[in-house]
Image: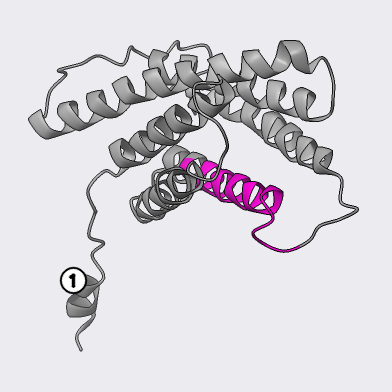
């Protein structure tokens, strides 16, 4: 095969932007999960399918496409939170006894998982301020949610942090529905239909 022919076959095909699907997955799972935290519904058994399919698999798939498209922000963020929701779903399964007896295990241990995600989330938030205003606000509420989940799980003022986590999660859902709809319509029509707000411009990229 001639060198020029080989080069032609190696042209990378760019896939469609999956961000709307990934953000929709976030919107759905936080809506369903917040209904339990707010006391509107009881239990987590019927939240688990949404956590796995929308919170986890939808975001992981979107992350995979973003990796192929060389979208650094989307690939890392959607992948990280897709894995987060899978871990949360498995923790709920353990709590319900679906995966066998876990006598002697301390359920507060999950609080350290939330704390770890909160730490990483702070770095993502810095970058989100240079993506759009809507994503920056979503990130701030995700930070609040993760810190509240961590402290509440570890037994630190749960009477304060549990409701704070619940309302933060609901606000994340509402804002994410708007963001998903905005990205979908703006991409489909090729112009700004619903604004997401310009980046703050605090830190300039190289």
Q: Indicate whether 104 appears above or below 33.
A: below
User: Which residue is situated farthest in the left direction here?
Assistant: 189
User: Which residue is situated farthest in the bottom direction here?
Assistant: 1
Q: Residue at x 43, y 53 (%)?
A: 57
State which quarter of the image contains the N terminus. bottom left
**Left or right of residue 177: residue 152:** right
Q: Secondary structure at mark 1?
A: helix
Residue beneath disc 1? 8
Count every numbered label the image shows and give the total.
1
**Magenta part, dominant SS:** helix
Can you see residue 140? Answer: no
**Left or right of residue 24: residue 113:** right
Residue 81 part of the magenta segment: yes
- Report the front residue among 95 and 139: 95
Q: Position of residue 134 (x, y in %)?
A: 39, 16
**Left or right of residue 29: residue 195:** left
Q: Position of residue 114 (x, y in %)?
A: 71, 35
Quick one: label 1, few (<14), some, or many (20+) residues within 10 Å? few
Q: Indicate whether 59 appears above or below 188.
A: below
Q: Residue at x 86, y 45 (%)?
A: 106
- Report the front residue among 197 and 60: 60
Q: Quadrant of residue 194?
A: top left
The colour scheme used here is: one colour
- Report the front residue among 152 and 63: 152
User: From which residue to which does the magenta span run?
Assistant: 78-100
Q: Quadrant of residue 121?
A: top right
Residue 38 part of the magenta segment: no
Q: Quadrant of residue 122?
A: top right
Q: Position of residue 69 (x, y in %)?
A: 33, 51
Q: Residue at x 48, y 44 (%)?
A: 46
Q: Indicate whether 154 appears above or below 80.
A: above
């Amino acid at each position: 095969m001639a060198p020029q022919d080989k080069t032609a076959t190696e042209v990378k095909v760019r896939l469609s932007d999956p961000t709307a699907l990934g953000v929709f997955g976030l919107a759905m799972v936080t809506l369903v999960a917040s209904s339990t935290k707010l006391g509107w519904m009881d239990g987590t058994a019927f939240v688990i399918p949404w956590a796995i399919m929308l919170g986890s698999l939808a975001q992981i798939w979107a992350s995979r496409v973003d990796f192929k498209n060389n979208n650094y922000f989307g690939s890392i963020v959607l992948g990280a939170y897709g894995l987060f929701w899978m871990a949360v779903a498995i923790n709920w399964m353990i709590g319900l006894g679906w995966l066998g007896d876990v006598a002697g295990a301390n359920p507060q241990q999950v609080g350290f998982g939330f704390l770890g995600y909160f730490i990483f989330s702070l770095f993502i938030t810095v970058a989100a301020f240079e993506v759009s205003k809507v994503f920056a606000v979503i990130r701030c509420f995700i930070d609040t949610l993760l810190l509240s989940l961590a402290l509440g799980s570890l037994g630190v003022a749960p009477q304060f942090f549990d409701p704070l986590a619940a309302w933060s999660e609901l606000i994340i859902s509402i804002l994410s529905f708007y963001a998903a709809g905005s990205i979908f319509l703006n991409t489909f029509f090729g112009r700004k239909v619903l604004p997401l707000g310009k980046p703050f411009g605090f830190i300039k990229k190289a």
